[in-house]
Amino acid sequence: MEIKKLHLPEDEYFPSETEKKSIVLHHTAGSHRPDWVVSAWDRDKTKGGKSLRVATHFVVGGKSTRDGNSDWDGKIVESFDLKYWAHHLGTRNNNNILLNQQSIGIEICNYGPLTKSQNGEFFTYVNSKVPEEDVIDLGKNWRGFRYYHNYTDKQIESVKFLIEKCAEIYKIDPCKGINELYEPYLERIKDWSVLEQQKFLNSKGYLGMNGKPLSEDGMIGRNTNYALRLYTDAKREKWKPFDYQPLANEGGEGVWSHTNFRKDKFDVYPHPKLIEMLQNF
């Protein structure tokens, strides 16, 4: 997979080499073009004209919400060399600088939480419209919002590629971090035979529509489908690992979400396909 280098000037990051022990996933709260994100970082300054040195190592492009253009979908831009660092966490911890130095930042071009209007249209926090096809319904509120700008399949594929690449370079275990907060199993139960599904669902206490354990006969029916749906929904709604985590703020190793470091952030949100990708490491 190609990575386009669009490096910032040296005063926009810290050109000092640091060892990395974690990978932090973000989204930009903006539009689909990663080159625009990097350009914005180049322009942001303090009131005194000094560079803020806020950036992440990589930005993954997305699909335009204005005209559906997908030329940048899944495209990866590198904004500075992996061995250097910049501010991207913004915690109020005493170890904030160290956390930034030791982490690799990956941004996904995405607006984040959406508001649904009375006539069924979806709007971002800057009041731009998002087509319904680019909206994901989480089924219930997460951090106050039920609807979010959807991460595309190509974006998730690119994030997986970057995690693998960075993990290999710095010997970071992608099974640590947010993955450790899940139950030790996240079985791809839909890939199993019906009999295997029935046995597993019974072992976990999922009942059929009749309120009874499933018949382990290998025959699909409404009771098995009902229990399977309950299990799938429960897994989809297991969002606690995306909440604030003391371990992340203590410098824990592995892959984390920005939401693990700050309670006021929405990046990244618990997208089912993102969770599945992380769990498959």
Image (spheres, rainbow, N blue to C red):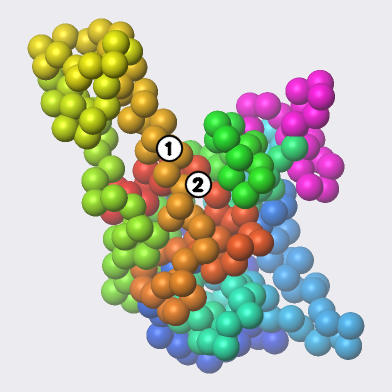
Q: Could you say where residue 66 lies in the image, as x and y percent from the top left?
A: 77, 36
Specify the quadrant of the image occupied by residue 227.
top left
Query: Is disc 1 placed on a helix, strand or loop?
Result: helix
Measure the alpha-carbon separation of dots 2 and 1.
8 Å
Evaluate whether residue 108 shows in this view: yes
Q: Is residue 203 above or below residue 182?
A: above
- Residue 206, given in percent of the width and then of the height, sits at 27, 27
Judging by the rendered image, the residue that carries numbered circle 1 is: 236
Residue 12 falls left or right of residue 103: right
Relative to the observer, which residue lies in front, 229 or 155?
229
Residue 121 among those drawn in magenta: yes
Q: Which residues are magenta?
A: 116-136
Q: Residue at x 44, y 79 (%)?
A: 250
Q: Residue at 30% across / 23% down in the picture? A: 228
Residue type of the residue flagged with mark 1? Arg
Which mark is first along the chain, 1 or 2? Answer: 1
Q: Picture coordinates of residue 218 (x, y %)?
A: 12, 13
Q: Residue at x 37, y 38 (%)?
A: 235
Q: Is 166 displayed left or right of 38 in the figure? A: left
Judge left or right: residue 200 versus residue 166: left
| Residue 59 visible to an observer of this rendering | no
